[in-house]
Image (cartoon, rainbow, N blue to C red):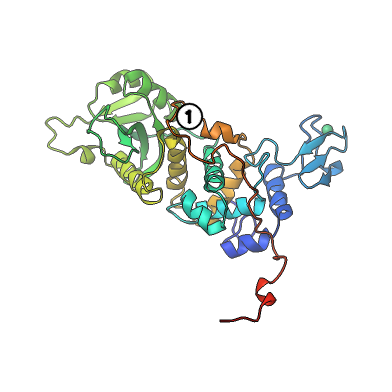
Amino acid sequence: MPSRGLQYPGSFAEVRAWFPDDEACMDYLDWLRWPAGPVCPACGHTAASAAVVSGRVWRCGACTKRVSRTAGTIFQDTRTPLTVWFAAGWYMTADPGGVSALTMQKLLGLGSYQTAWAMLHRYRTAMVRPGRELLSGRVEVDETLLGGEQPGPRGRGALGKTLVVIAVELLEPKGYGRARMKVITDASASSLREFLLATVEPGATVVSDGWSGYPNACQEWFEHEPHAIAGSGSQAHELLPAVHRVASLCKRWLMGTHQGRVEPEHLRAYLEEFCFRFNRRHARARGLLFYRLLQNAVHADPLTYRQMVANPQPKAVTPTGVLGARSRPGSLALPPEDRPWRTTTDLE
Ligand SMILES: [Zn+2]
């Protein structure tokens, strides 16, 4: 297991001390990506003869191809200094409630809200690890409605909110394991089955309510344990306490940290962020989340700004600044160039 003070920083003070400038940040990303030295994507040549040419480019010692150190990561083509990215990654993982783009913009003194939002969103896309394990044992599954500021009618198919399916592992004798959440178009057997096959280990037990979609979704792949509410004398949240707990924590997070301002087309990414944090709620150090986030980030596909703001349902009003010119945010590199307070003796 990676340890604090060796593989990852233990505090924000340590982040600032370890990563005073972009080159230190870049070196940490290199180390996460190529622990044994860089590998040339063209000829597969490793380590020893590779040399840094300039800033963010390696030149392969064997085939002389130039290799971008950020290509194939979420940091590809970014104009934001890595010192700012690292501070953002720390804030995003250090607080159990995460951070909103607006708060991030203020904390880091960023000129634009979009820069803050784009950083957080790129990190969110890196929170899903490809090939992560399937949930196993007994797994509670249910759908719920999330997002949307206006309270819509309750039940399946309500307007103004997005239908989300939630799966949570049940531990023996008690307690919850890992959670997964996904936006679904409807609660049909085929939608539920697609989610289950991608999320739950075959042969595991699916615990659901009495909804008729589940028997057909489980079929021969999963054991099915329906808890029908009719005649049970129980409330819905008592029948499936794990998914209701996760749903209410997620709602509270969306309404609290993000004040309910999550657009439906981006909800999927917010759910990944919620699960990333929920599934690491017992981590012995917050820095471990920072480490995992950056580790995922150097292996995640880059995302262009246009891809991020792509919206399948065109809006009447285009948010200002989204596709306009962006300035390069100020660096957090240390030490600062000057001591501005020394330019004055006016203390009033
Ligand atoms: Zn090469």
Asked whether residue 342 appears in the rendered view, the answer is yes
Judging depth in this view, the residue of 57 and 333 nearest the camera is: 333
Q: Is residue 194 above or below residue 166?
A: above
Q: Amino acid at mark 1?
A: Asn
**Quadrant in the rendering for residue 71:** top right
Task: Give percent across and percent down for residue 148.
Answer: 33, 38
Residue 179 appears left or right of 124: left
Q: At 51% from the left edge and 40% from the top edge, which residue is drawn?
A: 320
Front-lying residue, 90 or 332:
332
Residue 200 position by quadrant: top left
Residue situated in front as seen by the camera: 305 or 322: 322
Residue drawn at 14 percent across, 34 percent down: 232
Circle 1: is it few (<14), some (14-19), or many (20+) Cα within 10 Å?
Answer: few
The image shows residue 162, relative to residue 108, as above or below, that is: above
Tag 1 residue = 311
As helix, strand or loop, the secondary structure at mark 1 comes to loop
Residue at the image position 55 percent from the left and 42 percent from the top: 118
Residue 67 location (% of width, % of height): 78, 37
- Residue 198 at x, y percent in the picture: 45, 26
- Residue at 65% across / 81% down in the picture? 345
Cβ of mark 1 under 8 A from ligand 1: no
